[in-house]
């Protein structure tokens, strides 16, 4: 039985979302994505990553795909 992960490392979150670690850290800095920390190790809860992705605009700002 495989237990699903509750939280992802920066690299795992980047791979799962298709965004770079830098983009994810900027989203945390901007207050749009929540990271959790145990000592200095940051993780992103799977639910928080999904919410951040859901909150992204459905259309690009330029109107192009």
Image (tube, rainbow, N blue to C red):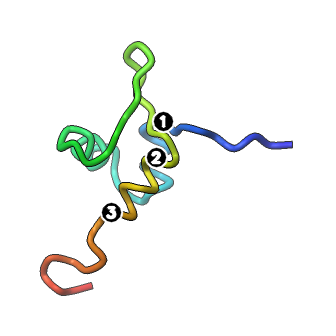
CA–CA distance between discs 1 and 2? 6 Å
* N-terminal label among 2 and 3: 2
Q: Secondary structure at mark 1?
A: loop
Q: Quadrant of residue 38?
A: top left
Numbered circle sitting on residue 49: none
Q: Quadrant of residue 25?
A: top left
In the image: residue 15, left or right of residue 5: left
Q: To which residue does mark 1 refer?
A: 9
Q: To which residue does mark 2 refer?
A: 13
- Tell me if residue 56 comes above or below residue 49 in the rendering: below
Residue 43, image x, y percentages: 45, 32
Q: Secondary structure at mark 3?
A: helix
* Cβ atoms at labels 1 and 2 below 8 Å apart: yes
Question: Disc count in the image?
Answer: 3
Residue 16, image x, y percentages: 50, 54
Residue 24, image x, y percentages: 31, 46
How crowded pointer 2 is (Cα within 10 Å; few <14, some 14-19, many 20+) is rated as many
């Amino acid at each position: 039985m495989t237990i699903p992960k509750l939280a992802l490392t920066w690299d795992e979150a980047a791979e799962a979302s298709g965004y770079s670690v830098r983009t994810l850290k900027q989203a945390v800095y901007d207050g749009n994505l929540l990271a959790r920390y145990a000592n200095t190790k940051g993780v992103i809860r799977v639910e928080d990553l999904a919410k951040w992705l859901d909150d992204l605009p459905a259309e690009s700002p330029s109107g192009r795909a």
